[in-house]
Image: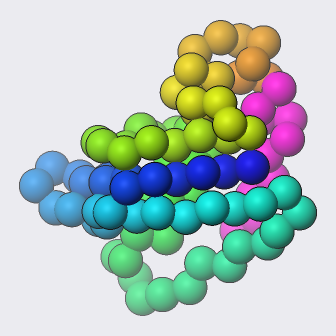
Amino acid sequence: MYNIEDVMCAYDNHIVFEHLTVNIKKGQYLILMGENGRGKSTFINLIAGFIAPLSGKLSFDSQDLSQLLKHNKTKRQFYARLGILF
């Protein structure tokens, strides 16, 4: 479902993570754990399409996520398949 390759995210001059590569397959659960300020919320915002990576590639079902979110129809289809529990 998700293919995240060599992604970098940062706020101002603070790098949250870089060289992040993760594959999340259909039906797989992912649990994020860690200390405050380590990038958990940033990662969720990234895969939800709320923020874009500074570099790297992020795809959902083999389609570039930024392209899916550009058009209302594909954006609705993407969000209909996304579930996040805080």
Q: Is residue 33 left or right of residue 36?
A: right
Q: Position of residue 12 (x, y in %)?
A: 15, 50
Spot occupied by residue 49 in the image (x, y as percentages of width and height): 56, 39
Q: Is residue 8 above or below residue 63?
A: below
User: What scheme was used to colour the molecule?
Assistant: rainbow
Q: Is residue 24 above or below residue 37?
A: above
Of residues 18 and 82, the one drawn nearer to the viewer in this rendering: 18
Q: In the image, is residue 27 part of the stretch drawn in magenta?
A: no
Query: Residue 63: which quarter of the image?
Result: top right
Rendered residue at 32%/53% (across/down): 9
Q: Is residue 2 above or below residue 25?
A: above
Counting from the top left corner in percent of width and height, residue 56 is at 37, 45
Query: Is any part of residue 41 visible from this angle?
Result: no
Please identify the quadrant where the C terminus is shown: bottom right
Please state the horizontal and vertical placement of residue 17, each as a whole percent of the image.
Answer: 31, 66
Residue depicted at 49% across the width and 70% down the height: 40
Q: Is residue 73 visible?
A: yes
Task: Please give the range of residues in magenta.
Answer: 77-86
Instruction: Identify the residue at horizontal 29%, vertical 42% (top origin).
Output: 54
11 left or right, relative to 66? left
Residue that sits furthest to the left in the current view: 13
| Image-based side of 60 in relation to 22, left or right | right
- In the figure, 39 relative to 56: above or below? below
| Residue 84 is covered by the magenta coloring | yes
In the image, taking residue 29 as reference, residue 2 lies left or right, namely left
User: What residue appears at the point 62 percent right and 45 percent down from the top-left corner?
Assistant: 48
